[in-house]
Image (cartoon, grey):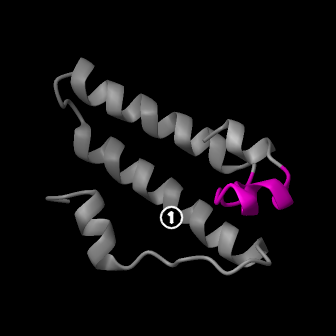
């Protein structure tokens, strides 16, 4: 995913890779660290960490929709519940 943001728009369209905003990379990295932390720390403070990650992802998605010229899929509550079951 990190490499995908460096592909020119024309190439990404051909490869069916969406444009990636630069500010989503730190959030993706943070998310990977959250997942690792869940296993390493045996779920200590898991809910707080997960909520912080979900908030950051939500902020980025709002920013992407405001700044992008291309249409984006807007996640709905059902898709978020599937992505984060039990939360």
Please name whichever residue, 31 or 4, is drawn nearer the observer in this view of the structure: 4
Badge 1 marks a residue whose secondary structure is helix
Residue occupying the point 44% across, 33% down: 32
**Extent of the magenta region:** 8-21
Residue 49 image offset from top left, x and y in percent = 34, 42
Q: Is residue 74 above or below residue 81?
A: below
Q: Is residue 17 magenta?
A: yes
The quadrant the N terminus occupies is: top right
Residue 20 highlighted magenta (yes or no): yes
User: Which residue is pictured at 76% across the width and 73% down the height?
Assistant: 68
Percent position of residue 15, x then y: 68, 55
Q: How many labels were placed on the picture? A: 1
Q: Which residue is at 24% across, 67% downward? A: 81
Looking at the image, residue 79 sits to the left or right of residue 67; the answer is: left
Quadrant of the snapshot with the C terminus: bottom left
Q: Which residue is mark 1?
A: 58
Q: Position of residue 31 (x, y in %)?
A: 45, 40
* For residue 6, above or below residue 37: below
């Amino acid at each position: 995913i990190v490499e995908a943001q460096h592909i020119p728009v024309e190439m990404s369209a051909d490869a069916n890779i969406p444009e990636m905003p630069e500010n989503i990379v730190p959030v993706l990295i943070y998310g990977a660290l959250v997942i690792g932390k869940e296993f390493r720390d045996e779920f200590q403070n898991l809910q707080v960490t997960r909520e912080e990650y979900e908030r950051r992802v939500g902020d980025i998605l709002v920013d992407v929709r405001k700044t992008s010229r291309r249409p984006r899929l807007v996640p709905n509550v059902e898709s978020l519940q599937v992505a984060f079951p039990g939360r």
